[in-house]
Amino acid sequence: MSAVKFFGGLLVGAVVLVGLGYMVVNQRKADDKVLAQQNEAASVPAVSVVHPTPTSPDDDVVVPGSTQAFAEAGIYARTSGYLKAWHADLGARVKAGQLLAEIDTPETDLELAQVRATRQQLAASLELAKSSAARWEELRKSDAVSQQELDERKAAVTQQQATLAASDANIRRLEELASYRKVYAPFAGVITKRNVDTGALVTAGNTAQQQLFYLAQTTPLRVFVSLPEGYAAGVKPGLAAWLEVPQYPGRKIVGTVTRTAEVIDPATRTLLTQIDVPNTDAALMPGAYVQVHLKMTVTMERLQIPINTLLFRAEGLRVAIVDSQNAVHLQPISIGRDFGTTVEVLQGLSVTDWLVLNPSDSLADKQTVHPQRPATEGATKK
């Protein structure tokens, strides 16, 4: 009986030990599971996210540009000779048709005198041919000369008339050439270069070495700017603009859009636009750097995002978007203007996207994260 009790006690002890071991194993499994979950949670980075901010459609678009003369041209000699005198120097403001220089052309003058003397000889020969033909015509009536001889005399008159006409044409050519001795301004403007001095030999032609003056029309001026494609639909001729110039701080110089290229440049995705500025006080000079302001309504949706949401990758500019499953997507975007702390986004985002702030360089596409939304967003969702 005592043996039965002994073995019964051993059995009960064994069962207790097995139960305790089973409990210990289960507790260790539960602890390992919790630890694994904690490690997994710790391996998923927490990131702060924000929404893009929409921009008002009415905007003051600011683009850089440079002023250009409304018209400019190099002034060259149309006849060869020696510069007799110049009447406009560097910086001189001239009117259209104003005398700029005079050229002494002795060879042209002598050639003109020679062809005029030759014309007198030809005119005398023509009169003789005419009188001879008239006499032979009278003699033909009495059959004193043949019809062949009369026709030859008439042909001589025609030939002399043609020779005289050719001489007159040559005289007109030389007279026109001689008129180029005086060089006039083709339009009103300012002399920006004078490349010759009195006594210099000039040759007719438009080679760089023979340029006498360079003339630029500065009233009005033209400004060419390249507008991003997103603004192309909003710019039309007649749109008001104003210029901001560094040398005149605080001053607004008014201009007007006069024309556009009407085509988007495929290389830069911009629209070439011309703005005319009256410049009646000659405050602006050609070649000056300006900031052009255009007040216009933009039809496309434009967003602004913080500058610290941008990722500069080898494949191009990206932002990290967190989807509803807390997975990251690296989204390519097209940006517009840079406002310092924010940039304008023209393509690639919507106002409902969540963007990662200060994304790390190691952030990968489809990586899981814990988004930390702004407090106002969380309060709204509750």
Image (spheres, rainbow, N blue to C red):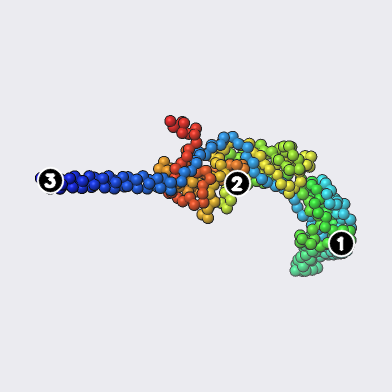
Q: Residue at x 77, y 55 (%)?
A: 74
Residue 372 visible to an observer of this rendering:
yes
* Quadrant for the N terminus in the image: top left
Residue holding disc 1:
200
Q: Label 2's element?
A: strand
Q: Residue at x 87, y 58 (%)?
A: 197
Q: Is residue 182 above or below residue 299?
A: below
Taking the image as shown, residue 117 lies to the left or right of residue 23, namely right
Crowding near pointer 1: few (<14 within 10 Å), some, many (20+)? some
Q: Label 3's element?
A: helix
Q: Nearer the viewer, residue 102 or 73?
A: 73
Q: Residue at x 76, y 61 (%)?
A: 207
Question: Circles 3 and 2: CB distance less than 8 Å?
Answer: no
Residue 352 x %, y %: 47, 38
Q: Earlier in the sequence, mark 3 or mark 1?
A: 3
Q: Nearer the viewer, residue 340 or 111?
A: 340
* Quadrant for the C terminus in the image: top left
Residue holding disc 3:
2
Residue 225 x %, y %: 65, 46
Q: Which mark is residue 271?
A: 2
Q: Nearer the viewer, mark 3 or mark 2?
A: 3
Taking the image as shown, residue 154 lies to the left or right of residue 337, namely right
Q: Quadrant of residue 338?
A: top right
Crowding near pointer 3: few (<14 within 10 Å), some, many (20+)? few
Cα separation between marks 3 and 1: 145 Å
Q: Is residue 77 above or below residue 341?
A: below
Cα separation between marks 2 and 1: 46 Å
Q: Earlier in the sequence, mark 2 or mark 1?
A: 1
Amino acid identity at mark 1: Ala
Amino acid identity at mark 2: Leu
Q: Earlier in the sequence, mark 3 or mark 2?
A: 3
